[in-house]
Amino acid sequence: SQTIHQWPATLVQPVGSPLSLECTVEGTSNPNLYWYRQAAGRGLQLLFYSVGIGQISSEVPQNLSASRPQDRQFILSSKKLLLSDSGFYLCAWSSGTGVTGANVLTFGAGSRLTVL
Amino acid sequence: KQEVTQIPAALSVPEGENLVLNCSFTDSAIYNLQWFRQDPGKGLTSLLLIQSSQREQTSGRLNASLDKSSGRSTLYIAASQPGDSATYLCAVSWETTDSWGKLQFGAGTQVVVTP
């Protein structure tokens, strides 16, 4: 069966510090990978998605970047965090083949980031 | 503009009552609609997935209906229990060529079931 892991679960960082959140998927190959953010009082927003190694699409301009160095690894980064980067970050995956599979997402447990 | 709306934003019911959660969407061209549950500080748990060709899906005490023509989905939870307390989110996958996997979420309905 497929599993998705995110870490760290909780992170408190000062403004201006770097960020790295990691997500890995097991039990599948060539998945589509996604980063969503849930800010306080706001709904879930898609930040980045990837259909393959090194292929990253950004949905909204921001202070963050994403990378996919391996097939089942997705990393969310920032060089200098802003207060507005605080939120709950969720990684998700879907099947990389077919319209039906590509639109069924499974989410990780999330990483809560607080920027002070 | 494609939007997903959930009403009400919050709901409190006594244990045993049936829950009715509403989700509306502005464009009927969808691949599917998913209902998720989110406990405080936790990730999303998928409850039900309805493909665009389906009218409803059932899992245990949960039943979700889909009416594409009117842009509505309803999640019914029968005989609610305190353990059903959580935020329920609906998410739509729009039927446009570049939107595979790009779910658009409603803001959620926060449910409290009192013993």
Image (cartoon, rainbow, N blue to C red):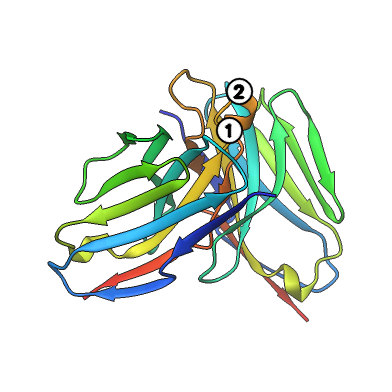
User: Alpha-carbon distance for marks 1 and 2?
Assistant: 9 Å
Please say whether residue A2 is visible from this viewpoint.
yes
| Quarter of the figure with the N terminus of chain B | top left
Q: Which residue is at the front of the view, B7 or B77?
A: B77
Residue A5 image point, x, y percent: 52, 59
User: Which residue is nearer to you in this view: A102 or A38?
Assistant: A102
Position in image of residue B19 (x %, y %): 76, 59
Residue at 75% in and 75% down:
B82
Residue at 45 percent of width and 30 percent of height = B2
Q: Earlier in the sequence, mark 1 or mark 2?
A: 2
Left or right: B71 with respect to B19? left
For this rendering, which residue is in front, B8 or B87?
Answer: B87
Q: Quadrant of residue B80?
A: bottom right
Whether residue A3 sits left or right of residue A116 in the image: it is: right
Residues tagged by mark 1 and mark 2 found on one chain of the structure: yes
Mark 1 against mark 2, which lies toward the viewer? 2
Amino acid residing under circle 2:
Gly
* Chain label for disc 2: A
> Of residues A8 and A113, which is closer to you in this image?
A8
Residue B38 x/y as whole percent = 59, 62
Q: Residue at x 38, y 35 (%)?
A: A53
Q: To which residue does mark 1 refer?
A: A103
> Label 2 belongs to which residue?
A98
Q: Which chain does tag 1 point to?
A: A
Q: Residues within 10 Å of mark 1 (few under 14, many from 20)?
A: many
